[in-house]
Amino acid sequence: MEYDLLELQDAMRKVLKPKRYLHSLGVQFTCASLAMRYECDIMKAQVAGILHDLAKYYDASEQISRCEQNNIPISDIERKQPYLLHGKLAACYAKSEYGIEDEEILQAMAYHTTGKPDMSKLEKIVFLADYIEPSRRMIPGLTEIRKLAFEDLDLAVYTTLKNTLNYLKSNGQTIDNTTIEAYEYYKDIVGNK
Ligand code: DGI
Ligand code: FE
Ligand code: FE
Protein backbone atom coordinates (compact mmCIF):
# COMPACT_ATOMS: atom_id res chain seq x y z
CA MET A 1 0.00 0.00 0.00
CA GLU A 2 1.27 3.45 -0.92
CA TYR A 3 0.52 6.41 1.26
CA ASP A 4 0.74 10.06 0.28
CA LEU A 5 2.09 11.73 3.40
CA LEU A 6 1.94 15.20 1.87
CA GLU A 7 -1.72 14.74 1.07
CA LEU A 8 -2.46 13.50 4.60
CA GLN A 9 -0.55 16.46 6.06
CA ASP A 10 -2.51 18.88 3.86
CA ALA A 11 -5.76 17.33 5.01
CA MET A 12 -4.75 17.60 8.69
CA ARG A 13 -3.62 21.20 8.25
CA LYS A 14 -7.18 21.95 7.16
CA VAL A 15 -9.06 20.13 9.93
CA LEU A 16 -6.78 20.83 12.92
CA LYS A 17 -5.92 24.06 14.72
CA PRO A 18 -2.33 25.22 14.10
CA LYS A 19 -0.96 23.96 17.43
CA ARG A 20 -2.66 20.58 17.05
CA TYR A 21 -1.31 20.37 13.51
CA LEU A 22 2.20 21.06 14.78
CA HIS A 23 1.67 18.37 17.43
CA SER A 24 0.54 15.90 14.76
CA LEU A 25 3.60 16.63 12.62
CA GLY A 26 5.72 16.13 15.74
CA VAL A 27 4.05 12.79 16.39
CA GLN A 28 4.55 11.78 12.74
CA PHE A 29 8.29 12.49 12.86
CA THR A 30 8.76 11.01 16.33
CA CYS A 31 6.94 7.88 15.14
CA ALA A 32 9.37 7.72 12.22
CA SER A 33 12.38 8.01 14.54
CA LEU A 34 11.12 5.33 16.92
CA ALA A 35 10.26 3.08 13.98
CA MET A 36 13.87 3.40 12.78
CA ARG A 37 15.17 2.61 16.23
CA TYR A 38 12.93 -0.43 16.74
CA GLU A 39 12.79 -1.72 13.17
CA CYS A 40 9.11 -1.10 12.65
CA ASP A 41 7.44 -0.03 9.38
CA ILE A 42 8.45 3.64 9.07
CA MET A 43 5.66 4.54 6.64
CA LYS A 44 2.89 2.95 8.71
CA ALA A 45 4.19 4.67 11.83
CA GLN A 46 4.09 8.05 10.09
CA VAL A 47 0.57 7.55 8.75
CA ALA A 48 -0.73 6.64 12.22
CA GLY A 49 1.19 9.60 13.69
CA ILE A 50 -0.09 12.30 11.36
CA LEU A 51 -3.71 11.10 11.58
CA HIS A 52 -4.00 10.05 15.25
CA ASP A 53 -5.78 13.20 16.52
CA LEU A 54 -7.99 13.90 13.52
CA ALA A 55 -11.16 13.53 15.63
CA LYS A 56 -9.88 15.67 18.53
CA TYR A 57 -12.15 18.63 17.77
CA TYR A 58 -15.57 17.13 18.10
CA ASP A 59 -17.18 18.24 21.33
CA ALA A 60 -18.33 15.74 23.94
CA SER A 61 -21.82 15.17 22.55
CA GLU A 62 -20.47 14.85 19.01
CA GLN A 63 -17.89 12.27 20.11
CA ILE A 64 -20.80 10.20 21.42
CA SER A 65 -23.16 10.72 18.50
CA ARG A 66 -20.50 10.04 15.88
CA CYS A 67 -19.50 6.82 17.66
CA GLU A 68 -23.13 5.76 17.77
CA GLN A 69 -23.54 6.51 14.06
CA ASN A 70 -20.53 4.33 13.30
CA ASN A 71 -21.40 1.47 15.66
CA ILE A 72 -18.38 2.07 17.89
CA PRO A 73 -19.20 0.63 21.34
CA ILE A 74 -19.07 3.19 24.16
CA SER A 75 -18.18 2.10 27.70
CA ASP A 76 -19.67 3.81 30.78
CA ILE A 77 -16.38 5.58 31.41
CA GLU A 78 -16.18 6.78 27.81
CA ARG A 79 -19.71 8.10 28.15
CA LYS A 80 -18.54 10.16 31.15
CA GLN A 81 -15.27 11.21 29.44
CA PRO A 82 -16.22 11.38 25.76
CA TYR A 83 -12.85 12.75 24.64
CA LEU A 84 -11.47 9.27 25.38
CA LEU A 85 -13.29 8.27 22.17
CA HIS A 86 -11.29 10.53 19.84
CA GLY A 87 -8.76 7.78 19.03
CA LYS A 88 -11.40 5.22 18.07
CA LEU A 89 -13.24 7.81 16.05
CA ALA A 90 -9.99 8.82 14.35
CA ALA A 91 -9.40 5.21 13.33
CA CYS A 92 -12.94 4.98 11.98
CA TYR A 93 -12.59 8.14 9.86
CA ALA A 94 -9.06 7.26 8.76
CA LYS A 95 -10.66 4.26 7.10
CA SER A 96 -13.83 5.84 5.73
CA GLU A 97 -12.49 9.30 4.82
CA TYR A 98 -8.80 8.76 4.14
CA GLY A 99 -8.79 5.23 2.75
CA ILE A 100 -6.52 3.73 5.40
CA GLU A 101 -7.30 0.01 5.47
CA ASP A 102 -4.31 -1.29 7.40
CA GLU A 103 -5.59 -2.71 10.68
CA GLU A 104 -2.26 -2.20 12.45
CA ILE A 105 -2.36 1.52 11.68
CA LEU A 106 -6.01 1.78 12.68
CA GLN A 107 -5.45 -0.05 15.98
CA ALA A 108 -2.48 2.14 16.85
CA MET A 109 -4.63 5.24 16.30
CA ALA A 110 -7.56 3.79 18.25
CA TYR A 111 -5.52 3.12 21.41
CA HIS A 112 -3.20 6.12 21.40
CA THR A 113 -4.81 7.75 24.45
CA THR A 114 -5.19 4.85 26.89
CA GLY A 115 -2.70 2.35 25.57
CA LYS A 116 -3.71 -1.26 26.19
CA PRO A 117 -2.14 -4.55 27.35
CA ASP A 118 0.16 -6.39 24.96
CA MET A 119 0.50 -3.65 22.37
CA SER A 120 2.11 -4.23 19.00
CA LYS A 121 5.37 -2.42 18.32
CA LEU A 122 3.50 0.11 16.19
CA GLU A 123 0.93 0.71 18.93
CA LYS A 124 3.67 1.32 21.48
CA ILE A 125 5.46 3.69 19.13
CA VAL A 126 2.36 5.82 18.48
CA PHE A 127 1.42 5.81 22.18
CA LEU A 128 4.89 7.04 23.15
CA ALA A 129 5.37 9.46 20.27
CA ASP A 130 2.15 11.21 21.30
CA TYR A 131 3.64 11.75 24.75
CA ILE A 132 7.19 12.77 23.83
CA GLU A 133 6.90 14.65 20.53
CA PRO A 134 8.96 17.88 20.47
CA SER A 135 6.05 20.35 20.87
CA ARG A 136 4.52 18.61 23.89
CA ARG A 137 4.25 21.00 26.83
CA MET A 138 6.92 20.21 29.42
CA ILE A 139 5.66 17.93 32.16
CA PRO A 140 7.53 16.27 35.06
CA GLY A 141 9.50 13.26 33.90
CA LEU A 142 9.25 14.08 30.20
CA THR A 143 12.98 14.60 29.67
CA GLU A 144 13.69 11.14 31.10
CA ILE A 145 10.93 9.45 29.09
CA ARG A 146 12.18 11.10 25.87
CA LYS A 147 15.56 9.49 26.44
CA LEU A 148 14.13 6.21 27.69
CA ALA A 149 11.88 5.90 24.61
CA PHE A 150 14.99 5.32 22.51
CA GLU A 151 16.57 2.91 24.99
CA ASP A 152 13.82 0.57 26.21
CA LEU A 153 10.40 0.63 24.56
CA ASP A 154 8.49 -1.33 27.23
CA LEU A 155 10.06 0.54 30.12
CA ALA A 156 9.20 3.84 28.43
CA VAL A 157 5.59 2.72 27.89
CA TYR A 158 5.36 1.65 31.53
CA THR A 159 6.81 4.91 32.81
CA THR A 160 4.43 6.93 30.61
CA LEU A 161 1.41 4.98 31.88
CA LYS A 162 2.58 5.43 35.47
CA ASN A 163 3.00 9.20 35.01
CA THR A 164 -0.39 9.51 33.31
CA LEU A 165 -2.16 7.56 36.05
CA ASN A 166 -0.51 9.67 38.76
CA TYR A 167 -1.52 12.82 36.93
CA LEU A 168 -5.12 11.67 36.50
CA LYS A 169 -5.36 10.55 40.13
CA SER A 170 -3.99 13.85 41.43
CA ASN A 171 -6.67 15.60 39.37
CA GLY A 172 -9.43 13.29 40.58
CA GLN A 173 -10.26 12.23 37.01
CA THR A 174 -12.13 9.06 36.09
CA ILE A 175 -9.68 6.46 34.86
CA ASP A 176 -10.48 4.13 31.99
CA ASN A 177 -10.11 0.38 32.66
CA THR A 178 -7.97 0.04 29.55
CA THR A 179 -5.45 2.53 30.96
CA ILE A 180 -5.26 0.57 34.23
CA GLU A 181 -5.02 -2.80 32.46
CA ALA A 182 -2.24 -1.41 30.27
CA TYR A 183 -0.38 -0.15 33.35
CA GLU A 184 -0.69 -3.49 35.17
CA TYR A 185 0.43 -5.40 32.09
CA TYR A 186 3.56 -3.30 31.52
CA LYS A 187 4.37 -3.20 35.24
CA ASP A 188 4.57 -7.00 35.08
CA ILE A 189 6.63 -7.03 31.90
CA VAL A 190 9.10 -4.51 33.27
CA GLY A 191 9.32 -6.26 36.65
CA ASN A 192 10.13 -9.59 34.98
CA LYS A 193 12.90 -8.24 32.78
O1 DGI B 1 -4.90 14.02 22.15
P1 DGI B 1 -3.63 14.42 22.86
O2 DGI B 1 -3.81 15.61 23.76
O3 DGI B 1 -2.48 14.59 21.94
O4 DGI B 1 -3.21 13.20 23.81
P2 DGI B 1 -4.09 11.97 24.32
O5 DGI B 1 -4.96 11.47 23.25
O6 DGI B 1 -3.12 10.99 24.93
O7 DGI B 1 -4.96 12.58 25.45
C1 DGI B 1 -4.26 13.12 26.55
C2 DGI B 1 -5.04 13.05 27.82
O8 DGI B 1 -5.71 11.81 27.97
C3 DGI B 1 -4.07 13.19 28.99
O9 DGI B 1 -4.41 14.34 29.74
C4 DGI B 1 -4.28 11.92 29.78
C5 DGI B 1 -5.64 11.50 29.33
N1 DGI B 1 -5.96 10.10 29.63
C6 DGI B 1 -5.27 8.97 29.36
N2 DGI B 1 -5.87 7.90 29.91
C7 DGI B 1 -6.98 8.38 30.54
C8 DGI B 1 -7.05 9.77 30.35
N3 DGI B 1 -8.04 10.55 30.86
C9 DGI B 1 -8.98 9.95 31.61
N4 DGI B 1 -9.95 10.68 32.12
N5 DGI B 1 -8.97 8.61 31.84
C10 DGI B 1 -8.00 7.78 31.34
O10 DGI B 1 -8.02 6.57 31.58
FE1 FE C 1 -5.07 12.19 21.22
FE1 FE D 1 -2.03 13.52 20.23
Image (cartoon, grey):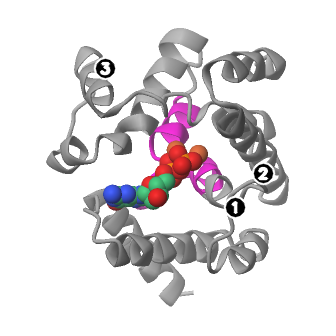
Q: Judge whether 135 appears above or below 1 on screen.
A: below
Q: Which residues are magenta?
A: 103-127
Which amino acid type is marked by label 3? Arg
Alpha carbon of mark 1 to alpha carbon of mark 2: how far?
8 Å
Q: Residue 10, percent across and down?
A: 76, 17
- The answer to whether the residue labelled 1 contacts the one labelled 2, judged by CB atoms less than 8 Å apart, is yes
Q: Residue 53, percent across and down?
A: 56, 36
Measuring 47% from the left and 77% from the top, which residue is drawn there?
162
Measuring 35% from the left and 71% from the top, which residue is drawn there?
171
Alpha carbon of mark 3 to alpha carbon of mark 2: how far?
29 Å
Read off the residue under disc 2.
Answer: 30
Q: Nearer the viewer, residue 64 or 42?
A: 64
Nearest-to-viewer mark from 3 and 2: 3
Which amino acid type is marked by label 1? Ile
| Helix, strand or loop for disc 3 | helix
Circle 1 residues within 10 Å: few <14, some 14–19, many ≥20: many
Measuring 25% from the left and 21% from the top, which residue is drawn there?
65
The label shown at residue 66 is 3
Is residue 108 covered in magenta?
Answer: yes
Which amino acid type is marked by label 2? Thr
Q: Residue 67, percent across and down?
A: 29, 25
Read off the residue under disc 1.
Answer: 132
